[in-house]
Amino acid sequence: MDINAAVIITDSDESPFALFAVDKVVYGVSSAHVLSIEILQKPTPLVNAPHYTPGILDFRGDMIPLIDLRRLFGKQKRGEELRAFMEQSRVEHERWMLEIETAAAEGREPFLGECQLDGWLTGFTSRGNSLNMHVQKMVSPHKSLHKDGGSVAALIRAGKRDEAVALCRKLRATHYKTIMNLISTTVDAYFDGVHDMLIVLNVDGVTKGVVADEIVSVEYIGKFVEMHMAQSAQSKYVKTIAKRDRDNSTVLMLDETLLIGL
């Protein structure tokens, strides 16, 4: 996000702002336009709807259209980066296990390489309890998997091919099986603790729902910044930039009228 900020301006609007995140960027709208903030329920799809519209939703007896900000701003679907990494990890561990087994059968030194999942597990952070617990389940069997892989290599070097092959069989039936099952269910664990949020806006009598990743807060903001933003999918919908009083972090304030007009 390329933003050049200049003059600080004090805002006179007395309404607090609803702040929410999309792909780790914090956006805001005036609470004067917010009718409701709630967990998004499954919408009813529309035929030939714009790409940013996942469907319509019953809101207090009226069917309102939805605007998915991830789609509107050209962002990846939520969880897609994690899904791609876990698929890569699955393929890498399949190859790793096959290499260990082939090396044991042939009596040669296996090429083990580096494990990307190990670094990911070590540096993992998340606010989702479901995913946190799932990742903790992966740590021990993953360490045991690679430790036993090292033991297979040591047996091969010692000329104990039969013992190396036997350990490979045990490894495939235990730690390898466990970690592969956990890899395959990681994305499900992520979505177990993740719920898209709905911010219902009303501007001049028109009501629409905005879909975001999470609600950050509802708070007063008194500092706005004269902005110069690089052109991007979201920049046309940003009317100004604000600085939060609590930590001076940046908030991109969206133009509610433009969103409602979509």
Image (cartoon, rainbow, N blue to C red):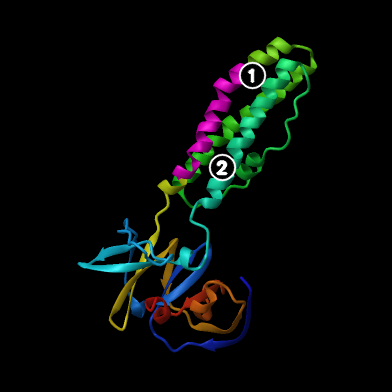
Segment colored magenta = 169-189
In the image, 223 versus 53, the foreground residue is 53
**Residue 27 percent across, percent down from the top left:** 48, 71
Q: Name which residue lies at 42% across and 80% down.
A: 258
Q: Which residue is mark 2?
A: 86
**SS type, badge 2:** helix
Q: Nearer the viewer, residue 215 or 108?
A: 108
The residue lying at 62 percent from left, 77 percent from top is 230
Residue 174, above or below 36:
above
Residue type pointed to by label 1: Cys
Q: Disc number at residue 77?
A: none
> Cβ–Cβ below 8 Å for labels 2 and 1?
no
Can you tell which quarter of the image residue 168 is in? top right
Q: Position of residue 145 (x, y in %)?
A: 62, 28
Looking at the image, residue 130 sits to the left or right of residue 165; the answer is left
Q: Quadrant of the C terminus?
A: bottom left
Q: Is residue 91 visible?
A: yes
* Label 1 crowd bin: few (<14), some (14–19), many (20+), radius 10 Å: many
Q: Quadrant of residue 121?
A: top right
> To which residue does mark 1 refer?
168
